Amino acid sequence: MIKVLIVDDSALIRSLLKEIISKEPDMMVVGTAPDAYAARDMVNRFTPDVITLDIEMPKVDGITFLDKLMKARPTPVLMISTLTAKGADATLKCLELGAIDYIEKPKIGVTEGIEAYRQIILEKVRTAAVSKVARRTSTPATVKQQSIISGTEKIIAVGASTGGTEAIKAFLLALPANAPAVVITQHMPPGFTRSFAERLNNLCKVNVSEAKGGERLLPGYVYIAPGDIHLGIEKSGADYRTVLIDGDRVSGHKPSVDVLFQTVSKTAGKNAIGIIMTGMGKDGAAGLYDMRQSGAYTIAQDESSCVVFGMPGEAIKLGAAMTVCHLDNIAKTVFDYLNVTGSGSRL
């Protein structure tokens, strides 16, 4: 039985979330709290398996409460967030502090789409209940790259979902300024990806931006799929360029990791490296298999360092991953491979 604590200053939202969760045979709501003070007492009294936490609350906001919670009693937390630029920044901060995932704040009085919303909540609660609470670690050391030249033909493709924002950050922080071009699909809603890219750009030696489509892939640059459209790559003469694909959901997602990996497989083949990171579900597993079959070097994050081992686990089952390694070692693994295979790359 999954014990859930609901923390929200809105009585209507507390009531809605309680109604949705209480109907499930494998879940029970152990308490509902209108503020951080009541929540603190309930955490100590009920030791919940999962907490849904509103970001915007009176007295003590959700970010402050989360920070204190993770230091005192680390617990899987789902943030209740507004899908705005301000909400995106706050949510990304919460993910940095250790929150597992986030859920859009429900629109009270809007019945259309409530069933889909219910399914999202229940899926994320169940995922959070079996996830690993992310531990804050020190900043990884930048990989020392001395022997190879980063050419425009080398591409690193990365896919992630739940827990991926921090995993991607850890990987990019370890990259030197002249790393090969990186293309990323992280499951996020529109607006969040821009904030995510901006935050990473302020932290990393590489240049990070939300992909606009048509950009030439250059060493030292990272392109992140926008939250509402698939990202792929295409060949343009001797160069690779980003392409945005406004199609249907693939593997249940838009943007989809499978779409990214499959276009990289077809376009770059053995000149690519594919990395599948923490995430719920199986998006990216088939695409990573295609990359391996086309001659790319493929890596899966190991279970011990994943928040959720769904996507990497599925890729490993398919035989898509040539190497399985801890998050902290992925960047080094990439450059060990490049140092063997990438000497003399064309600029």
Image (tube, grey):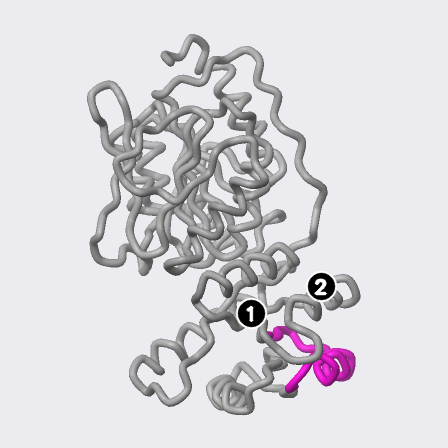
Instruction: Tell me what residue is drawn at x 70 percent, y 67 percent.
Output: 64
Quadrant for residue 211, please give it.
top left
Mark 1 or mark 2, earlier in chain: 2
Instruction: Specify whether residue 47 is painted magenta.
Output: yes
What kind of residue is marked 2?
Answer: Asp
Residue 180 to residue 315: above or below: above
Q: Of 217 and 299, which appears nearest the observer?
A: 217
Whether residue 344 is visible here, answered yes or no, is: yes
Instruction: Tell me what residue is drawn at x 31 percent, y 43 percent.
Output: 212
Instruction: Tell me what residue is drawn at x 65 percent, y 66 percent.
Output: 63
The magenta region covers 33-53
Q: Secondary structure at mark 2?
A: helix
Instruction: Specify whether residue 288 is painted magenta.
Output: no
Q: Quadrant of the N terminus?
A: bottom right
Residue 295 to residue 302: above or below: above
Whether residue 23 is visible here, answered yes or no, is: no
Residue 87 to residue 142: above or below: below
Q: Of 213 and 278, which appears nearest the observer?
A: 213
Left of 220 or right of it: where is 287? left
The image shows residue 66 at horizontal and vertical percentages of 68, 67
Tell me the distance, in whole angstroms, between the alpha carbons under discs 1 and 2. Answer: 13 Å
Local packing at callout 1 (Cα closer than 10 Å; few below 14, some 14-19, many 20+) is many
Residue annotated with mark 1: 79
State if disc 2 and disc 1 touch (CB < 8 Å). Answer: no
Quadrant for residue 9, please give it.
bottom right
Q: Secondary structure at mark 1?
A: strand
What kind of residue is marked 1?
Answer: Met
The image shows residue 78 at horizontal and vertical percentages of 56, 69
Instruction: Tell me what residue is drawn at x 59 percent, y 82 percent.
Output: 8
- The circle on residue 67 is 2
